[in-house]
Amino acid sequence: MKVKPMGPIPPGFEAENAMLLIGGRGVAALADEAGETPFFAYDGAMIRRRIAALRAAMPDAIGIHYAMKANPFPPLLALMRGLVDGFDIASSGELAAVLAAGMAPQEISFAGPGKTGRELEAALRAGVTINLESEGEAGRALAIADRIGVRPRLAVRGNPDFGLEGSGMRMGGGAKPFGIDAERAGALARQVIAAGADWRGWHIFAGSQALDAQAIIAAQAQTVALAARLSDEVGEVPPLVNLGGGFGVPYFAGDVPLDIAAIGAALGETLAARPDSMAGSAFALELGRYLVAEAGVYLTRVVDVKLSQGERFAVVDGGLHHQLAASGNFGTVVRRNYPLALANRFGEAAAEQPVTVVGCLCTPLDRLGDAVALPDIAPGDLVAIFMAGAYGASASPAAFLGHVPAPEMLIDEA
């Protein structure tokens, strides 16, 4: 059987006596601390370095917001509170979590096309910014604010007439459930201002998971131009323009890390050339996976190694119920291998015969590594699945087949 390629292991991971280290600690000791396998481990130092590098590359005028849907683990949110300038949320559950983490309400924005009346009221009472996704939502938010006697903080999410080329998920360009079409966004902003609301500006998100720096540069330039055009139409300076995100990470073989230096330089030029009508505006990037994906590892233990029709299978005690994306069942059309390694024999030479790593679930979809090159694997070995810091535990069907969620831990010695 031919070996199939894996994605690149993120830089920064090291080993001591062939034992993978996460946050400077060996994974065997972490497994003892977790009390069981499988579990997720997040390296706080890697997150700190990623955000510091991003700030160094971006213009000073750019704030960094964390889109917490990528990873809502409470200790990680507490870490993020001291590293970023705001949180972007998409539910009342996320609202409660970020408030519990201590983020100031005025630094929180709430997006999503299906906010219920209860969610709108909770957001209005808390004093967070609501990114309006439709005229109907605007009417409901204004009515609720009037009923409870608060001045609402409202931004308008525009559905741009362009998308982010090469993005994994296009959020703009054409008919979309997200935001208000650009040709109607200005009118809605004027309505919000006329109603006495505290208008907070624009939210324009063109797409996500792009690894093409030039595509991101083009989309950001178009976003700033659109925000300027809409602001001129409204006749007011937007307090904040949320430029969205779109920064991708290399999951698969052949993926190349994003050139953030090029993006930052181009964005600096774009902002320097913006019209005077937006001279007083603040700008922010809304990023999730780019900040946390590479810092996370899913650790699962080999239960059995078996042969079938001459092929080797390593059965582990984890699976897609915890790490759905690695199985290829979350947003990918063709299944490709995430980076894997034997965590307790990190760096050892691969065996001659490839092995397919499968989970413990009774479904053929539960495949975590397809014909991958690993050292001669045996029961008791720890398999590390990298790129597990984003859309892992909270984006997977943890209760499937009666299983329980995997423990999570943040290793942060700072």
Image: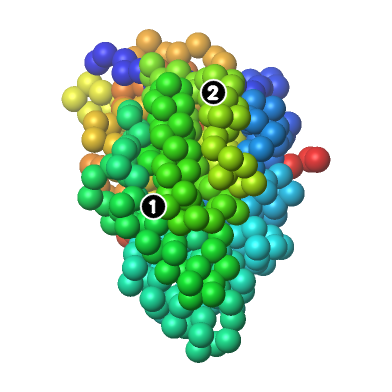
The x and y percentages for residue 409 are: 64, 49
Question: Does the rendering let one see residue 376?
Answer: no
Q: Is residue 262 above or below residue 72?
A: above
Asked if disc 1 and disc 2 are in contact, CB closer than 8 Å, the reply is no
According to the image, label 2 marks what residue?
266
Choose the circle earlier in sequence order: 1 or 2.
1
Residue at x-position 42% and y-position 52%: 233
According to the image, label 1 marks what residue?
158
Q: Is residue 215 above or below residue 80?
A: above
- Amino acid type, callout 2: Ala
Taking depth in this image into account, of 180 and 84 the one nearest to the observer is 180
Q: Quadrant of residue 254?
A: top left
The x and y percentages for residue 55 are: 67, 32
The x and y percentages for residue 287 are: 53, 42
Taking depth in this image into account, of 413 and 141 the one nearest to the observer is 141
Residue extending farthest bottom: 147
In-image side of 272 versus 79 (left or right): left
Helix, strand or loop under label 2: helix
Estimate how packed mark 2 is, as few (under 14), some (14 to 19) or many (20 or more) residues with alpha carbons within 10 Å.
many
- Amino acid type, callout 1: Gly
